[in-house]
Amino acid sequence: MYIGAIADDFTGATDLATALRERGLRTAVVVGDHDIPPGHDAAVVALKSRTAPVDEAVSTSVRAADRLLAAGARRLYVKYCSTFDSTDAGNIGPVLDAVTARAGVDRTVVVPTFPANGRTVREGRLYVGDVLLEDSSMRHHPLTPMTKSRLRDILAPQTAATLTEIDLSTVRAGIDTLRSSIDSSPAGYLIVDAVTDDDLAAIAAATAHLRVLSGGAALAAGIDVPAGTSPGPFPTVEAGRLVVCGSASSATRAQIAHALAHGAHGRRIDLDAAISRPAVEIAALAEWVRALPVGALPLVYSVGDPADVRARDGGIAAAVEHVLSALVDHLVRAGDVHRVVVAGGETSGAVVQALGVETLEIGRQLAPGVCWSAGVTASGTAVALVLKSGNFGADDLFTAAWEAIA
């Protein structure tokens, strides 16, 4: 295995796996503690550790690293969100500490940049589009409110490791200069500026000797891979489609609006019922899906426009995840649905776990960080899934995705 990766959520795992597949690697996403499948050039272990307690995040990440190394992974990759979702008591630093120690290395880079989705790092500060991270909508994230933009300031409370910033001029001075800077810096974590895909390609080339990398998915697009590799064919999956949206992001709301304006049939979850009578709400949603005309596109969502947004506390978020994941599982078991687009990282994790999928084969890219994947449920049903971060994808994603597996 050329590379083994650890992702802190399910959409992040498919995000990274998409980049690796685009490099020509046959790539699988492995759910949680399941076995690493043989015959792959790359494997990404999908965890639900982004907002888990630190001890849990570290232990699951170390178990994943051990399994990847035992499966023959030459290099390890710690994948986190390109908006560096974390808190002062968060998990990125402790996980990096544990994985680098397990691999026996004294340094790695920190590179969340993802230019295609507007995430860049300049002077050590993370930008979302043209604004600092702390001034973006991430400032109001219900679980990981990002009130700082300098990556060193975010990591400092999480780790005792030395944090060094490598500026853009060094990145653009040439691969040899950049590698020399990386090797001569103090042991610890090297926060590297990057604004463009060319910057990321330079960083990937300059870090080819490092056994551990860390970053968003875009850094993987520049990794040099063995000659002659190629991804395998995408499995055939029966018809029957569904879109479920647990995300309240503006991008997902725009995708919902576009789909509804172009023929999709939409139904918003009754949030009060989801909390107080979840079984009744799940049954009602399933009955609604089945009553639609053959070939219709059903779209079930929790937030359609800003007026729908209410305080997304843990209870409401958990209720939405439960209703949507149980709905998908019910319809798949009944044979009504085999192809599902899921919007939202937490919702994606809940759906995959409800289905009992152990491994996902990565297929065609639909947008930066978004792809089709295929797996088999615990009941033996083949399914195709798009696991989409709330902020990713063009407005027409929900209507255009199906053409890629037609």
Image (cartoon, rainbow, N blue to C red):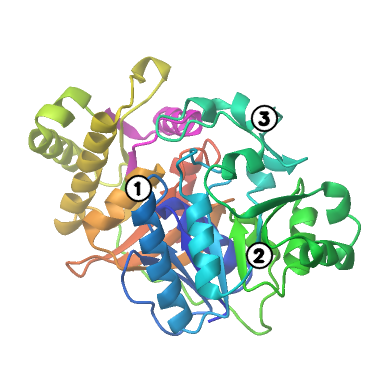
Image: 222 above or below 138: below
Image: 210 above or below 134: below
Which kind of residue does numbered mark 3 sit on?
A: Leu
Q: Which dot marks residue 53?
A: 1
Q: Residues within 10 Å of mark 2 (few under 14, many from 20)?
A: many
The residue to which callout 2 is attached is 107
Report x, y in % for residue 366. Answer: 54, 53
Which kind of residue does numbered mark 1 sit on?
A: Pro
Q: Residues within 10 Å of mark 1 (few under 14, many from 20)?
A: few
Apparent side of residue 342 relative to residue 95 in the rendered image (left or right): left
Do residues under tags 1 and 3 come within 8 Å of each other at their CB atoms? no
Magenta stretch, residue numbers: 243-268
Report x, y in % for residue 284. Answer: 12, 34
Res 240 seen here: no
Which kind of residue does numbered mark 2 sit on?
A: Arg
Q: Residue at x 24, y 47 (%)?
A: 325
The residue to which callout 3 is attached is 132
The residue closer to the viewer here, 333 or 30, is 30
Distance from disc 3 to disc 2, alpha carbons, whole Å, reads 27 Å
Report x, y in % for residue 103. Answer: 54, 74
